[in-house]
Amino acid sequence: MIVRILAEGQWDVSEDHLTELNRLDAEVEAAIEADDEATFATTLAALLDAVRSGGTVLADDSLEESDLILPPADATVDEVRELLNDDGLIPG
Amino acid sequence: MSLMKRMSLIFRSKANKALDRAEDPRETLDYSYQRQIELLSKVRRGVADVATSRKRVELQANQLEQQSQKLHDQAQKALSMGREDLAREALTRKSGLTGQLSDLKAQQAQLQGEEEKLTLASQRLQAKVESFRTRKETIKATYTAAEAQTKINEAFSGISEEMGDVGMAVQRAEDKTAQMQARAGAIDELISSGALDDASSISRGDDISRELDAMSSQSDVETELAALKAGSGSDQPEAIESGDSATEGQVDAQLEDQPKKEEGQA
C-alpha cells in the first residue's frame, strides 16, 4: 500500500499497519471536526510518524500512484479543510 | 470516509480531469511532459527565492547582533565610568533588539527548513520527470493510440500526483516567504530610519556614544595631565630622560642584556 505524505514523498507501508493508521487517521479527523488545532498537530504528527517508521521510502523515480495521501507535517486545520475542498489548494 | 482516502481521491480526480483534455492520448504525454519541465523550473526558482529571503534575514540578524553587542559594550564602558544612567539606557535599547533578534532567528530556521524541503522536492520531481520521459518514449514507440491509453494512465497518474504535491509545496513556500519578506522589509525600514541604527552608527555616533566619548576624552586629558605632572618630578623610575644616572645605568644594563637573552632563546 503506497502512502504519500505531502511535501515529503511516498512510502510503501504493509497492510499490517492499516489498522493503526486508520485509528490515528480517525483521531486527526476528529480534531479537524472539533477545530482543535493543538490536538490536530499532535495526532497528525503521530500519524505521519507511523507512516515513516512503518514503511519504506519509494525510490525518487517511481511513478506509482498513492492509495492514501496525508497532509504536510506543518499543515493547519484550515489548510486541510481547503485541501479536502475539490477546488482547494491542489493545483492542476 | 477517512481523511487519507478522501485526499487521495481528490488528487486522483484532478489527474483524471487533466487526462480527459486530449484527443489522442499520446499527445497527453508530450503535453504533460512540457508541464513537468515548467514545474521543475518553477520549483528551482522557488528554491532560489527562498534562499534569497533566508540570506536577507541572516544579514539582518547579523546587523542586529552587532548593534546588540555594541550596546552591551557601551553599557560596560558607561558603568566603568560610573554612569549607571547611561548604562541603563544602553541596556534598555539592547533589550528592545533582543525580541527582534529571536524573531529573525526563528524566521531564519523556518526558511532554512523550506529551502531544504523544496530542494528535496525538486530532486524527487527531477527523477520522476526523467523516468516519465523514458516511459513516454517507450509508449509512443510501442503502442497505437488505442492501445496506449492504459499505459498512459499508469504513467500519468503517478507523475500527476507528484506535480500536484510539488505545485502545492512551491505555493506554500512562496506564501510563507512573502509573509516573511514583508516583515523583513519592516525591519529594513526600521534600520534605515535610524531607530536602531542611531544607537550604534559609527560615522555619526549616537547620544550614548557621544557622551561616552566626551567623558573619555575628558579623562584622557586628565590622564595626560597627570602623566606630565609626574614626568616633571624626579622620583619616577619609568622616566628615562630624568637625568638620574643610576636609572640610566639600569636602562643601559637592561638594553645590553636584551641581545643575549634573544640569542639564548634562538
Image (cartoon, coloured by chain):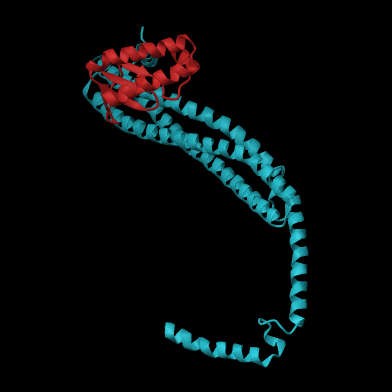
Chain colours: A red, B cyan
On the image, the x and y values in percent for residue B207 come to 76, 50
B101 w.r.t. A85: above or below: below
On the image, the x and y values in percent for residue B25 come to 32, 17
| Displayed quadrant of residue B93 | top right
Residue sitting at 52 percent across and 86 percent down? B258
Q: Quadrant of the N terminus of chain B?
A: top left
Is B150 displayed left or right of B46 in the figure? left
Which residue is situated farthest in the front direction here? B235
On the image, the x and y values in percent for residue B256 come to 54, 90
On the image, the x and y values in percent for residue B244 come to 69, 90
In the image shown, does B181 or B214 lie closer to the viewer?
B214
Answer yes or no: is residue A92 visible.
no
Is B40 displayed left or right of B87 in the figure? left
Answer yes or no: is residue B178 visible.
yes
Q: Quadrant of the C terminus of chain B?
A: bottom left
Is B266 displayed left or right of B220 in the figure? left
Is B91 displayed left or right of B214 in the figure? left
Residue sitting at 77 percent across and 82 percent down? B232
Residue sitting at 56 percent across and 42 percent down? B56
Residue sitting at 71 percent across and 42 percent down? B195
A17 w.r.t. B231: above or below: above
In the image shown, does B256 or B115 lie closer to the viewer?
B256
| Displayed quadrant of residue B24 | top left
Which residue is situated farthest in the top direction here? B1
In the image shown, does B67 or A76 lie closer to the viewer?
B67
B109 w.r.t. B33: above or below: below
Q: How many labels does the image show?
A: 0
B209 w.r.t. A9: above or below: below
